[in-house]
Amino acid sequence: MSTPLIKVSNLSKQYGDLLAVADVSFELPPSGSIGIVGESGSGKTTVAKILVGLERATSGKIEVEGQDWSLPAKNSKERRERAKYLQIVFQDPYSSLDPRQSIGTALREALSISMKDSDEVIVRASELADLVGLPQRILELRPAKLSGGQRQRVAIARALASNPKALILDESVAALDVSIQAQILNLLVDIREQTGIAYILVSHDLAVVRHFADSLIVMKNGNVVERGQTEAVMDQPNHEYTKLLLASVPGPGWVPGKRSI
């Protein structure tokens, strides 16, 4: 059996009297995809933030390709090294983009962390725009000139700048129209097929997870209440909470759009 890309064991996070994450465990195989689902306040985003070092776990263990990531990175060198393995894309791309920077500048800045040759950085920025389906002219624009879907593509491109082995998508399509959601999800599927990247999809929307994740865990009040292969859990849920989440999902005829990027 191959070593998991990411292995989370008994992860917990306490905020005062609130146990936001309680003994969460899961594995992500290389090039795999897992959904972490639950309503607001379930603890799923806290798990995501712990994985990328934005929060510190109270207890538990995180391993990435066998390396212990349980403690935050000690210095900037270690943070840069970890960025080669794992990146995150949040729900609101506008807040994560500098409104004063052009898109090209933002991508080149992200690339310069790991690439030192300025000519190579320029070429790679152009390649990233192509990879996420953005026309080259957009590199000269600032975020305010872009649509929500275009800004989210920029956020994905910037996250891919370090060529990570896994990408965490924290409600990354939740704020977009359904048709744009479909385009972004299909784009991410295409990128996975091209690069072999793995995904952790954090979402309240089981319909999105169904069409994207190989397996899933369902969280409620910080606890994992159900887990398994996505189709199996959604076709035959065991926990009442999972059944409640499924009750809000569109019917079986719903498909998140065609593959028109």
Image (spheres, rainbow, N blue to C red):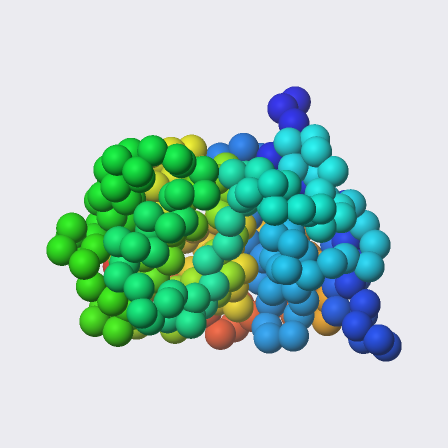
Up-down relation of residue 13 to residue 29 (above or below):
below
Up-down relation of residue 165 to residue 170 (above or below):
above
Q: Measuring 71% from the left and 50% from the top, which residue is drawn there? A: 72
Quarter in which the N terminus is drawn: top right
Quarter of the image where one finds residue 46: bottom right
Q: Is residue 175 visible?
A: yes
Q: Is residue 198 visible?
A: no
**Side (left or right) of 131 relative to 28:** left
Q: Nearer the viewer, residue 34 or 151?
A: 151
**Side (left or right) of 259 relative to 173:** left
Quarter of the image where one finds residue 237: bottom right
Residue 143 position, x and y percent, is 28, 68
Residue 105 position, x and y percent, is 30, 55
Q: Nearer the viewer, residue 164 or 243?
A: 164
Q: Measuring 21% from the left and 71% from the top, which residue is drawn there? A: 145
Quarter of the image where one finds residue 7: top right
**Side (left or right) of 121 relative to 237:** left
